[in-house]
Image (tube, rainbow, N blue to C red):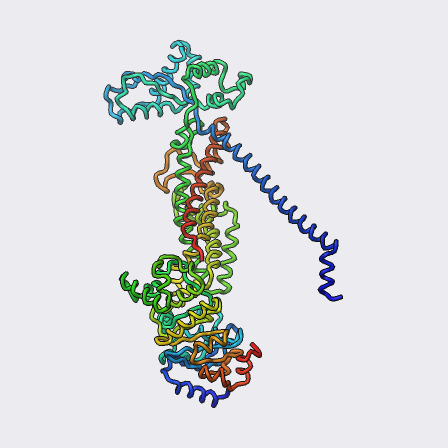
Amino acid sequence: MTDASTAKAYFQSEAAAKLVRKRYAAERRFRFYGMAMIAVAMFFLAVLFYTIISGGIMGFQTTSIKVPVPLTAESLGVEQGATPEQLRDIGGFKLTKIARNALYTQLGIADAEKPLKSQADKLLSNGIDTQLREILQNDPAIVGSTVDVWLLAHGAVDPFVKGQIDRNLPEDQRLLNNQQLAWVDRLEKDGRLELQFNSGLFTNGASADPELAGVAVALIGSLFIMILVVAAALPIGVGAAVYLEEFAPRNRFTDLVEVNINNLAAVPSIVFGILGLAIFINFMHLPRSAPIVGGLVLSLMTLPTVIIATRAALGAVPPSIKEAALGVGASKMQAVFHHILPLAMPGILTGLIIGLARALGETAPLIMIGMVAAVFEVPSSPFDPATALPVQIYMWAGMPERGFVALTSAAIIILLVFLLTMNATAVVLRKRFERRW
Amino acid sequence: MDKRQAETAEKQMVEGAAEAKFVTRGVHVFYGEKEAIKGVDLTIYNNEVTALIGPSGCGKSTYLRCLNRMNDTVESARVTGSILLDGTDIYDKKVDVVQLRARVGMVFQKPNPFPKSIYENVAYGPKIHGLASKKADVDAIVETSLKKAGLWNEVSDRLDTQGTALSGGQQQRLCIARAIAVSPEVILMDEPCSALDPIATARVEELIDELRENYAIVIVTHSMQQAARVSQKTAFFHLGDIVEHGQTEQIFTNPREERTRDYITGRFG
């Protein structure tokens, strides 16, 4: 019998058929594992999104109480026709008193009932003076008239309105007593208390009161940091990678540099924070808590990622393109910058996205350089004190008030939207650079 | 091949006609410790096609890449001996490699147009060398180069499409157009047809024959038929050395060396 006929006989045998069945079964099993894993991942992703969004959606809303406020010139202590500057200088105590009196009237509390008045005070936020001042400054002509104002409710009221706290708890375990709850219910029934869009979330800085706290400082801080990281890490990283990949001689020293770059990518981020503290703040005397330092520290952290991705992308450009450029007499630098680098751009941008995403979510090094402070003023330059979104989330997560739970989730949503916007921009850019050959 | 024989061959070539463009003597190339080329003497003439043939790994491509110093890009490569282009040693320190490559153009084995428009592909060389600055001048260079490369009629109405979108044969002719756009004196071709189908190959061979009028051409090829069809001079490389070189007709009909005969009749290689 020849080899060919033996083989033929074998392929028709039961043993061979069994082998084929086993092969198919193995493939089916593997497909099943793959699909099962994806299903599990999707499930947990859905749980995550449900948790964040259902928790965070409340953070975008806040309780307000509508009260007719008599803004008489006498009670304000100004003359009719006062300038915005004069209105700005009205004391907060005076404004708070006006707002509170308006609420007493609304709730029908007599002037002599001191204990009731102090209980009613707890329904209003500590920020109502600022609110009234803004209204006055925006329209000085309303001095002397009575206007309906949606005053911010106190952070203790908010969770009850949102149904986050069980109102059947014993009275001494609640932040609102029975009297206050009754007022809340009455105001709600009259349509004078409702959930409104929490615009303060986007315009306010730090505050110990959840109804007054916002992410503005953190958002601008993160924006400054990201701009700095792109401006510093991209050119330096790409430059370093081009030099190492295309120009540097291959020797023991460059090998050492390469090994160290790879190791730097794995260094814990807090170490970069210590480095930033030592160099940028203690040695170069840059301001503490400022996005400029945060941006520089995170640039250092992002550099290895950008360098490694860029080198990989440069290496993936077919050598024939470089030969073609050199062949028509382009210098090495022209070949790299006219041809190789543009072709490597998609890969470089992918690396940049990964690096930026990591930098955006980084907390530890920013805490090291003092970006964990409570900052009230929205920064106008990278040299002003600020925080960053993840640091803000971290700080809020540790706050005791119930209102911060929703705010934490809301800030996470804002961080995710920031991240997605940034990535989408990079993806669009990458698409523009992608060419086929 | 002993010295006397080499001299007669050389004499014979000189009698053939034209002025010498490249004169190379005792060219050695080392890759680290390995000697890839072991003392090659060859003269390349104007208005002629010189074919370099030989089995894979015999050093013909390495030799070709010495002529425009493409070997410079290989870090471990070291070239000794003299390579004179119009009497000037191209490995002299004073020679600028960028200008040299403008004078000695190259076409590669695999068509490698830039992933840019056809126009950009051809215009790139003239632009970086400052041969033309005005749009009209560049346009003229692009047109003449594409015409010389026999591609103008096929692409004149779509100069802004990607060079990589052309067929393989068109891409290779685009690469030739790109090489001649910088007005070189010599064109080096490293197996320019090995990735092309027979029709595209015939088209490129025709083109090589036309280009011969204005340039010295050196072509490395694996196809003996191609060498016989397009070249006037042929050099047979084996194991890093030239076994025999001379008029193409003589090499293919009446080789002096046993090894040459064996190779061209297909007995080894």
Residue A50: % across, % down: 53, 32
Q: In the shown orientation, is residue A9 left or right of residue B244?
A: right
Vertical placement of B165 versus B260: above or below? above
Query: Residue at the location (50% across, 79% down)?
Result: B237
Location of residue A335 by image quarter: bottom left
Q: Which one is nearer the viewer's eye here, B23 or A18?
A: A18
Q: Which one is nearer the viewer's eye here, B262 or A240?
A: B262
Task: Let me know if residue B240 appears in the view.
Answer: yes
**Residue that lies at the very extreme toward the bottom in this rendered image:** B4
**Residue that lies at the very extreme toward the right in this rendered image:** A1
Tally the marks: 0
Residue B210: % across, % down: 37, 74
Residue A252: % across, % down: 51, 64
Q: In the shown orientation, is residue A253 left or right of residue A227?
A: right
Vertical placement of B182 versus B88: above or below? above
Q: Which one is nearer the viewer's eye here, A330 or A2?
A: A2
Position of the C terminus of chain B, as image quadrant, is bottom right
Q: Which one is nearer the viewer's eye here, A305 or B25?
A: B25
Location of residue A44 by image quarter: top right
Residue B170: % across, % down: 41, 64
Vertical placement of B63 versus A351: above or below? below
Task: Let me know if residue B88 appears in the view.
Answer: no
